[in-house]
């Protein structure tokens, strides 16, 4: 796969991850468990901490290209919510790990890997398309978290144009 494509995709994916990191870092402790929206399945699904974690869980899973056998790293669990919310430190550590893995995955992408089909119940994209889908998902939740803080008068980053590789 051409280097310019990999570099461009990483610069934008890395920026989306940085846009997610910003509200997580800026979230005061008293808002970590705040409700962004009511969720009928479980109220915690609409909490600030869960939206941040959810974004990273799916980023991590999509970097593998398959949900089969996927397990997030400890202390995170698949398929159930923890008794207590994950801490900001735990979520930020997961974010840093996902950022490193994302960059390595994108920069190591071959034409063959990019074209592999990834089978999910709701779609069957190429691995490359799945990464673009994942980038959009990360950015969606980054915007939701930023909006939630902005509604509380907590300003965040205006715009991050390219990847910030400060922890790589």
Image (cartoon, rainbow, N blue to C red):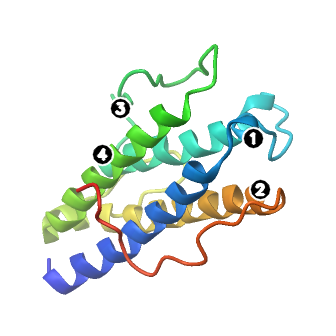
Q: Kindly report the distance in space between the C-alpha atoms of the residues bearing marks 2 and 4.
A: 30 Å
- Residue appearing at x 35%, y 43% in the figure: 66
Query: Who comes first in sequence, dot 1 or dot 2?
Result: 1
Tell me, yes or no, if residue 65 can be seen here. no
Image coordinates for residue 26, horizontal then vertical, percent: 61, 53
Query: Who comes first in sequence, dot 4 or dot 3?
Result: 4
Image coordinates for residue 44, horizontal then vertical, percent: 74, 30
- Mark in the foreground, 3 or 2: 2
Secondary element at image label 2 = helix
Residue 118 lies, with reference to residue 50, above or below; the image says: below
**Would you name the residue on which mark 2 appears?**
148
Do callouts 3 and 2 mark residues in contact (Cβ within 8 Å)?
Answer: no
Name which quarter of the figure residue 31 lies in: top right
**Would you name the residue on which mark 1 appears?**
31
Nearer-the-camera pick, 153 or 98: 153
Query: Who comes first in sequence, dot 3 or dot 2?
Result: 3
Residue 131 lies, with reference to residue 162, above or below; the image says: above
**Would you name the residue on which mark 3 appears?**
70
- Which mark, residue 122? none
Left or right position of 126 against 105: right
Query: Who comes first in sequence, dot 3 or dot 1?
Result: 1
- Which mark, residue 64? 4
Secondary element at image label 1 = helix
Query: Who comes first in sequence, dot 2 or dot 4?
Result: 4
Tell me, yes or no, if residue 57 can be seen here. yes
- Residue appearing at x 61%, y 22% in the figure: 81
Q: Kindly report the distance in space between the C-alpha atoms of the residues bearing marks 3 and 1.
A: 30 Å
């Amino acid at each position: 796969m051409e280097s310019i494509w990999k570099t461009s995709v990483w610069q934008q994916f890395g920026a989306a991850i940085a846009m997610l990191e910003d509200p997580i870092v800026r979230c005061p402790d008293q808002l970590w468990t705040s409700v962004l929206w009511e969720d009928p399945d479980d109220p915690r699904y609409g909490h600030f901490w869960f939206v941040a974690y959810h974004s990273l869980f799916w980023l991590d899973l999509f970097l593998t290209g398959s949900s089969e056998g996927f397990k997030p790293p400890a202390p995170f669990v698949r398929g159930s919510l923890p008794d207590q919310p994950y801490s900001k430190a735990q979520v930020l550590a997961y974010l840093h790990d996902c950022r490193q893995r994302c960059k390595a995955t994108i920069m190591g992408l071959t034409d063959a890997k990019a074209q592999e089909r990834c089978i999910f119940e709701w779609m069957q994209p190429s691995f490359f398309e799945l990464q673009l889908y994942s980038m959009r998902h990360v950015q969606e939740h980054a915007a939701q978290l930023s909006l939630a803080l902005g509604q509380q008068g907590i300003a965040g980053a205006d715009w991050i144009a390219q990847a910030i590789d400060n922890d790589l």
